[in-house]
Amino acid sequence: MNAAYIVGTFDVAELAFLLFFGFFVALVFYLNKESRREGYPLEDEVTGVVENDSSLFDGDKKVFPLPHGRGTYVPEDVARDDVNVPAVQAFRAGGAPWVPTGNAMADGMGPAAFANRAKYPDLTFDGKPRIVPIAQSHELVIAPNDPQLVGYPVVAADGVTVGTVSDIWVDQAEHMVRYLEIELTGGKKVMAPMMVAVVHGNSLLAAILPTTSDEKDYVEIDAITAAQFEGVPALETPGTITRYEEDRIQAYFGGGYMYATPERSEAWI
């Protein structure tokens, strides 16, 4: 008798095949349920009709524990974003682009879109505010050979000087400059992401090589025009920036690369 047979002609190879087939079918159902635990139900982009799936394919809600004793977060229990945006579709079809009818940078259209993040500051591992003015970091300083930036004039995309850098905000977790605080000529203070700023001048060149250039020290921010600096979302509490405010500010400047001037939103070819 062949020891490979278990019962009659049913052998180990058949058993292994059936176990694999059963596991594979179960895996397909499991992955489908897992993929539907957040962001469902689906709805048609044009008609808004919600697709109803059977409970066989619907998984349980995702629950995310939040750090620092802030409880839990269940995405499906949070109110959905308002889809009544100030825009119209270029043509009636799923995936058709939306054409803004208002101020796209303030309304969160396209590259200026933002998420409704939590309205409290991002924190470090030990629970301290992550992004703070450099004087409040107690750890970080600008190297003596690097441009100090505070007091530098700020030039917008249209070549107009809008104000001066009044402070530097640093990331205490990543040890890098995140934002420049700018005091506008009218007295208002706004935040600008460091990623959209370019530093010019002798202070930068002198750190690399000797120079006799008479180029002035200044910061260029070509994301938006001088007039649009007045519309930068303001901080609710001085000295503190929340996650929501970060998203709004970065989206405003990011949207400027497409909406700051009419020609930026036109096709290149």
Image: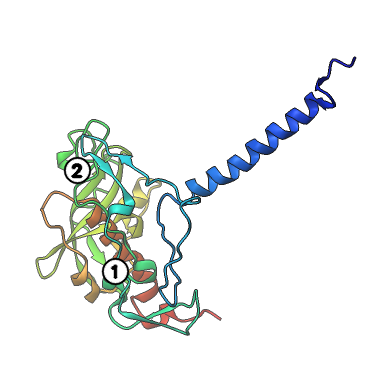
**Is there any visible trace of residue 53 in the rendered image?**
yes
Among all residues in the image, which is located at the extreme right? 1
Residue in the image at 33% along x and 75% along y: 260
Q: Which mark is residue 134?
A: 2
SS label for mark 1: loop
Q: Nearer the viewer, residue 141 or 101?
A: 101
Q: Nearer the viewer, residue 10 or 39?
A: 10
Question: Which residue position is annotated with label 1?
Answer: 82
Q: Position of residue 71 (x, y in %)?
A: 23, 39
**Would you identify the image quadrant in which residue 212 lies?**
bottom left
Q: Amino acid at mark 2?
A: Ile
The image quadrant where one finds the N terminus is top right
Residue in the image at 15% along x and 40% along y: 136
Between disc 2 and disc 1, the foreground one is: 1
SS label for mark 2: helix
Q: Position of residue 186 (x, y in %)?
A: 10, 70
The image quadrant where one finds the C terminus is bottom right
- Against 125, residue 265 (above or below) is below
